[in-house]
Image (cartoon, grey):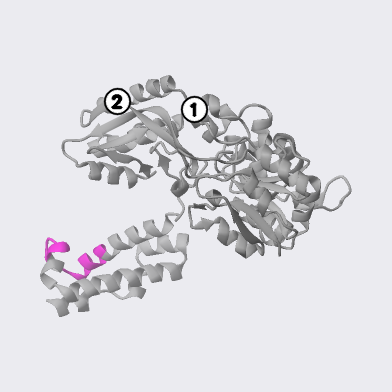
């Protein structure tokens, strides 16, 4: 039987002439379809050679296995492979975890204004490096420069492609070949094995550690200053907190010491907040303008964390120091493109207008109140309960900022707990994750949990559609 089935496998050239293959060739190209067919037929050949009995059971035909039945099976598998091939690797997902700046899920979702700006700039030519006033070549660093400076309260600003690049640029521009003083308690490692000491080494600056893990005094910095000192670095401990018997000089103290010594003071703020988030329960996250107001010569921070914009590293500070960074040859390697500038400018203008808590998704999620979440969760729970297949429970819970920001800070939320008597919690979680628009949840105490703090109102129907599909009910979008 094995030899019979193997001989019955049609050739790739023959399958290329089938209606399905011809249709797919128009979408993918004939050579890509040929490759997919080769994969399918090789897969079938391996299965037939391995176990003929299972092969007959897997591909039954009313009249027994025949060349036609094999062709049907090849067509079925080809359609599946083509569908997979047409699915983008990078896909939209719904973040129902309650982790606001979720690094694994792309960190900050962009504001609608930022998306509009990306579409407008990406679909056309732009004045990225063209001065519209003079009609001559311009510099891309001019974009967002004044806007950042206004919001940060600095003399000048420049944008790199992420905050790790910003740290590298500042250290290399201002301290190459010299020493940089930093507290042992601030020699952090964040996600992706980004370590301050290693970045400092690559920048050409030499690390001068002072103090201890839990206590560093201003006198420790003062004693470490020599004629080799080029910079004092203060690092915001983005993803951890040291509590108990601790001491850390304020930014103003370090800035004053650096001023007396005639050297710059630099603060890496990590996530970077342009507004005070303490009224919404996020404490301990420094505001960029406050750091500069305290006397810091230069600061850097991320654009795609608590600022809520695109991936970027923003550097703000004195005109002289930013000028040195701008002249650094590394700046060309670490610069951003027109899409980033477009999204960043649109996001920053929302802050300038005072609309961040309404229009910037990350800030809106942080600012969302418990009562607002309770109303949304109650409404969705009623709709899920009406499906008749899920046990639904609401309970108080906590959301977190995430992304290495505000460790230890929990925001009160209302969690929707789901349980299906016919499906395990892992099955429900998997089926949601494998929905047409993947829905990422978490599992606690044997139940799938949904936190609407990180779900937009527009995404709620998609979650309901996925749950309806599990129950065999038509999706709302299909019904309409």
Q: Nearer the viewer, residue 424 or 151?
A: 151
Tell me how far mark 2 sits from mark 1, CA to CA: 22 Å
Q: Position of residue 116 (x, y in %)?
A: 62, 39
Q: Secondary structure at mark 2?
A: strand
Crowdedness of circle 1 by 10 Å Cα count: few (<14), some, many (20+)? Answer: few
Q: Position of residue 407 (x, y in %)?
A: 46, 39
Q: Position of residue 329 (x, y in %)?
A: 74, 63
Magenta residues? 57-73
Q: How many marks?
A: 2
Crowdedness of circle 2 by 10 Å Cα count: few (<14), some, many (20+)? Answer: some
Question: Could you tell me which quadrant the N terminus lies in?
Answer: bottom left
For residue 394, the mark is 2
Left or right placement of residue 101 versus residue 64 in this view: right
* Residue 66 in magenta stretch: yes
Disc 1 target residue:
281
- Report if residue 84 is visible in the image: yes
Left or right placement of residue 326 versus residue 268 in this view: right
Residue sitting at 72 percent across and 51 percent down? 125
Left or right placement of residue 33 versus residue 220 in this view: left
């Amino acid at each position: 039987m094995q030899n019979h089935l193997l001989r019955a496998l049609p050739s790739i050239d023959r399958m290329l002439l089938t209606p399905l293959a011809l249709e797919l060739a128009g979408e993918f190209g004939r050579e890509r379809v040929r490759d997919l067919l080769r994969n399918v037929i090789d897969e079938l050949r391996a299965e037939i050679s391995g176990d003929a009995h299972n092969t007959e059971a897997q591909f039954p035909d009313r009249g027994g296995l025949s060349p036609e039945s094999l062709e049907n099976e090849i067509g079925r598998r080809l359609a599946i492979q083509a569908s997979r091939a047409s699915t983008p690797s990078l896909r939209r997902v719904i973040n129902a975890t309650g982790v606001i700046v979720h690094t694994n899920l792309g960190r900050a979702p962009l504001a609608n204004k930022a998306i509009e700006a990306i579409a407008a700039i990406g679909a056309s030519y732009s004045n990225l490096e063209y001065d519209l006033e003079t009609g001559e070549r311009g510099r891309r660093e001019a974009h967002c420069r004044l806007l950042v400076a206004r919001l940060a309260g600095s003399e000048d600003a420049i944008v790199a492609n992420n905050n790790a690049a910003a740290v590298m640029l500042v250290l290399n521009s201002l301290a190459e070949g010299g020493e940089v003083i930093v507290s042992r308690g601030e020699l952090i490692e964040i996600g992706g094995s980004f370590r301050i000491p290693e970045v400092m080494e690559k920048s050409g600056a030499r690390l001068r550690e002072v103090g201890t893990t839990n206590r560093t005094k201003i006198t420790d910095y003062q004693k470490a200053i020599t004629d080799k000192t080029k910079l004092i670095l203060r690092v915001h401990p983005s993803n951890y907190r040291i509590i108990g018997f601790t001491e850390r000089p304020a930014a103003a103290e370090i800035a004053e010491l650096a001023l007396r010594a005639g050297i710059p003071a630099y603060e890496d703020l990590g996530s970077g907040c342009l507004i005070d988030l303490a009224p919404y329960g996020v404490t301990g996250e420094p505001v960029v303008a406050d750091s500069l107001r305290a006397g810091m010569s230069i600061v850097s921070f991320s654009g795609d964390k608590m600022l809520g914009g695109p991936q970027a590293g923003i550097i703000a500070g004195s005109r002289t120091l930013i000028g040195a960074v701008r002249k650094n040859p590394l700046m060309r390697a670490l610069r951003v493109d027109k899409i980033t500038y477009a999204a960043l400018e649109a996001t920053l203008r929302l802050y300038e207008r005072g609309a961040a808590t309404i229009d910037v998704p990350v800030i809106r999620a942080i600012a969302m109140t418990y009562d607002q979440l309770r109303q949304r969760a109650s409404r969705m729970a009623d709709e899920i309960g009406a499906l008749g297949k899920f046990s639904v429970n609401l309970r108080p819970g906590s959301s977190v900022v995430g992304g290495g920001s505000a460790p230890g800070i929990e925001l009160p939320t209302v969690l929707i707990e789901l349980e299906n008597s016919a499906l395990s919690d892992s099955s429900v979680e998997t089926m949601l994750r494998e929905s047409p628009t993947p829905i990422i949840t978490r599992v606690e105490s044997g139940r799938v949990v949904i936190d609407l703090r990180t779900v937009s109102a527009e995404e709620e129907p998609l979650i309901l559609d996925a749950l309806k599909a599990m129950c065999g009910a038509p999706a709302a979008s299909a019904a309409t």
